[in-house]
């Protein structure tokens, strides 16, 4: 890699996305650090810190939790991505950011973050997909595949159709499916062409996060 706008290798990014765990303190039944430790033991390959929604931490508390979770990720060689908060990602030297359609485009984020960082973008329509690719996103989150209770402003459920359409068109950018995905309904998402599964509640809200993550890891390894 050279220069500030250098991109990570697409196949490297793809290989990291298989079991993509997303969590903030409001998603957990127990302390977030314990849930993350267990989820990583089960086989999570990448983690996104998403501190959002009613009761979410702010300010120093948010920063301290993010740093604690980043340390856990680093200790286990799991990538640490920050949702939306570019300043937090920079302050922590996170491995990347994940943004939605209301945030800065990937090309602006890459200038702010510097080289070698992963930029993920949520996309829900073919137009949003094309724009995100044109702006230089490293991977896309496509959803909601199934109904989800974890995002108040989720778009209409769309199943796996957009993922399979994109693959049929020959679009190769790394993709994760997101929204209401469980170990029982994940297979069609992978079969449609997703490189990985993005999950909040099926792991964070599980009684046994390790076993829940392991079930996803088994599916994604096939
Ligand atoms: N983004 P769960 S759906 C954070 O469609 C998020 O872009 C979505 O949580 C999108 O695994 C979603 O608990 C929530 O359904 C995913």
Image: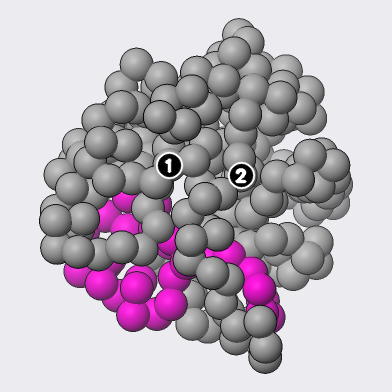
Is residue 153 shown to the viewer in this render?
no
Whether residues under marks 1 and 2 lie with C-beta atoms below 8 angstroms apart, the answer is yes
Question: Of marks 1 and 2, which one's residue comes earlier in the chain?
Answer: 2
Graded by Cα atoms within 10 Å as few (under 14), some (14 to 19) or many (20 or more), the crowding at tag 1 reads: many
Residue extending farthest front:
222
Identify the disc placed on residue 196.
1
Q: Position of residue 44 (x, y in %)?
A: 61, 34
94 over 24 or under it: above or below: below
Q: Write down the quadrant of residue 139 in the picture.
A: bottom left
Looking at the image, residue 45 sits to the left or right of residue 164; the answer is right
Q: Which segment did they paint magenta?
A: 113-142
- Label 1 and label 2: CA atoms lie apart by 10 Å
122 over 182 or under it: above or below: below
Question: Could you tell me which secondary element the residue under label 2 belongs to?
Answer: strand
Residue extending farthest bottom:
3
Q: Residue shown at 30%/75% (left/top)?
A: 131
């Amino acid at each position: 890699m050279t220069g500030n706008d250098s991109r990570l290798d697409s196949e490297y990014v793809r290989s990291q996305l298989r079991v993509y765990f997303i969590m903030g303190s409001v998603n957990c039944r127990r302390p977030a650090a314990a849930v993350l430790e267990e989820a990583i033991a089960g086989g999570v390959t990448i983690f996104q810190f998403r501190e959002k929604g009613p009761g979410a931490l702010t300010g120093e508390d948010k920063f301290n939790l993010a740093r604690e979770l980043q340390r856990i990720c680093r200790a286990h060689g799991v990538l640490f991505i920050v949702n939306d908060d570019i300043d937090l990602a920079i302050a922590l030297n996170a491995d990347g950011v994940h943004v939605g359609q209301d945030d800065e485009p990937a090309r602006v984020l890459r200038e702010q973050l510097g080289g070698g960082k992963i930029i993920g973008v949520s996309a829900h329509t073919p137009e949003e997909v094309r724009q995100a690719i044109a702006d230089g996103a490293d991977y896309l989150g496509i959803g909601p595949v199934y109904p989800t209770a974890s995002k108040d402003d989720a778009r209409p459920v769309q199943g796996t159709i957009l993922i399979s359409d994109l693959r049929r068109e020959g679009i190769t950018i790394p993709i994760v499916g997101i929204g209401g995905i469980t170990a029982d309904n994940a297979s069609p998402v992978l079969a449609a062409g997703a490189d990985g599964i993005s999950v909040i509640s099926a792991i964070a809200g599980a009684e046994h996060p390790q076993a829940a993550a392991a079930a996803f890891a088994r599916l994604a390894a096939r």
